[in-house]
Amino acid sequence: MMNELRILVAGVLSDKVLPALEKYDDEIIVWDLTQGKIKVDFLKAEKINFIISSGYSYIFPASVIEHCPIVNLHPSFLPWNRGPFPNFWSWLTDSPKGVTVHYIDAGIDTGDIIAQKKLDSLHDGMTLHQTNWATIEAVVELFIETWPLIREGKNQRYPQLGQGSYHTFKDIIPFQDVLINSSPDTPIRELCQAIRAKVDIDQIVEIRSQADFWIRHLERQSRARRNR
């Protein structure tokens, strides 16, 4: 890794990762979320050579991904629960709970993994709010621990293994009324029971998994063609 970085930090968790970055003499720019999507022209003008995505809600275009490395903080144990609301889906589908720091590629949360941590201490007697904050704190802590190695280019890097799962905002529509009308103090156990009584979650997950398989298949074909 180069001696000095010009880092763009983007996302709602920016203030939580800044202390780890400020220990070095790198230039740090915090993206103003009111400006919307990050564009490559801005990166070139500001000579940005590294991006940290920490709760950034937009999909990076190919021009930005190709411009410089992008590291993302994702609050799930990838490849499980890629996409929005990963902590929520880990409970509803009874999939692994954890957090991941990974590189951004052309897919959605499909890039190579830098570090992961399972969160076995979480339990369904907690509220969704409590587990959301627990995963946020855990992924920030994991990033802070890993950043010195990332900065020096000495971090591990390995591809995601297995099909995992992927969800979209639309997947929540069939039971959004349950989420809206539930009390903030409702334990996850009761929340999931109410949702499963309303919709067939297995069917939603199966449809999404089949679609995700073909999305990843087409992405692999596209990358193979670009590398020829």
Image (spheres, rainbow, N blue to C red):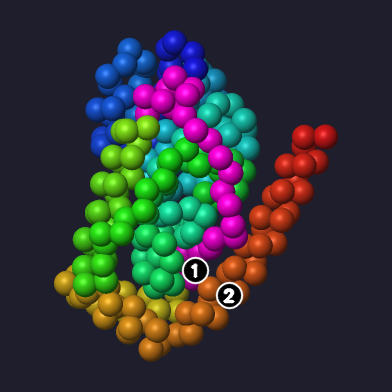
Q: Is residue 181 above or below residue 117?
A: below
Q: Amino acid at mark 2?
A: Glu
Relative height, residue 51 to residue 1 (above, below): below
Spot occupied by residue 22 in the image (x, y as percentages of width and height): 28, 21
Report the residue marked by disc 2. 206
Q: Residue at x 56, y 48 (%)?
A: 160
Q: Is residue 197 magenta?
A: no
Helix, strand or loop status at disc 1: helix
Q: Residue 204: x and y, percent?
A: 53, 77
Outermost residue, right side: 228
Q: Is residue 73 visible?
A: yes
On the image, numbered disc 1 is attached to which residue? 170
Q: Which quadrant holds the C terminus?
A: top right
Q: Main secondary structure of the magenta part?
A: loop
Q: Give the Cα separation between the discs numbered 1 and 2.
A: 15 Å
Please provide percent x and percent y for residue 138.
Answer: 29, 47
Classed neighbour count for the residue bearing mark 1: other residues with Cα under 10 Å, few (<14), some (14–19), many (≥20): few
Q: Secondary structure at mark 2?
A: helix
